[in-house]
Amino acid sequence: MKKEIIPYTRKVAYYETDQMGIVHHSNYIRWFEEARIDFLSQIGLPYSKMEEEGIMIPVLSAACEYKYAMRFGQRFQITLRIVSFTGVKFRVLYEVNDEDTGKLHATGESGHCFVTNTMIPIRMKKEYPDIYRRLMEYVQPQ
């Protein structure tokens, strides 16, 4: 049984909207990052601790599909799922929903890898087995 992840929630800020009064598309990718950072904290692996250990998690790819516009002040939640993890690379899927109605506003995905601060790939299972095991508890294949 895989462990549950608490959705990341927040409100759309005014500066995140454009002249049409809707959220600018670039903000969704930023929100995905916020949700990933929140997830790592939830499972006891705050990003600051990872960096102290010499672990970096660069983005290899990112995509978003926009369903319905979001507006200033709207409360939303992002649910994420790690759908693959090889020990070096992992892939995350996201859903952005209105917090009150549950309406789906966007879906997305991102790909990442683990590297040292000199950009050398890290085999997490071998070099950081405790972190590897903790992350494996949250993998939910498609």
Image (spheres, rainbow, N blue to C red):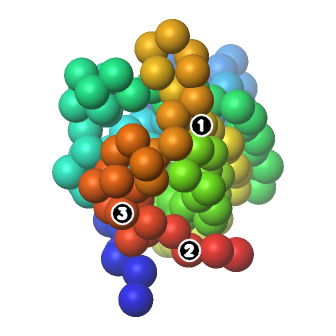
Task: Identify the amino acid type marked 1.
Answer: Cys
Around disc 1, counting alpha carbons within 10 Å, would you say few (fewer than 14), some (14 to 19), or many (20 or more)?
Answer: many
Q: Quadrant of residue 5?
A: bottom left
- Badge 3 marks a residue whose secondary structure is helix
Which residue: 26% across, 45% down? 45
- Badge 2 marks a residue whose secondary structure is loop
Give residue 102's position: percent from left, percent from top. 52, 71
Give residue 12's position: percent from left, percent from top. 45, 37
Q: Which residue is mark 1?
A: 113
Does 31 sit above or below residue 84? above
**Residue most toward the top?**
118
- Badge 1 marks a residue whose secondary structure is strand
Q: Could you tell me how far apart the alpha carbons at marks 3 and 2 are, in whole angstroms?
A: 14 Å
In the foreground, 2 or 127: 127
Does 124 sit above or below residue 132? above
| Marked residue nearer the N-terminal end (1 or 2) | 1
Q: Could you tell me how far apart the alpha carbons at marks 1 and 3 are, in whole angstroms?
A: 16 Å
One can see residue 69 in this view: no
Task: Identify the amino acid type marked 2.
Answer: Gln
Around disc 3, counting alpha carbons within 10 Å, would you say few (fewer than 14), some (14 to 19), or many (20 or more)?
Answer: few
Around disc 2, counting alpha carbons within 10 Å, would you say few (fewer than 14), some (14 to 19), or many (20 or more)?
Answer: some
Dots 1, 3 in contact, CB < 8 A: no
One can see residue 121 in this view: yes
Q: Which residue is mark 2?
A: 140
In the foreground, 108 or 90: 90
Does 74 sit above or below residue 4? above
Which residue: 27% across, 27% down? 53
Q: Which residue is mark 3?
A: 133
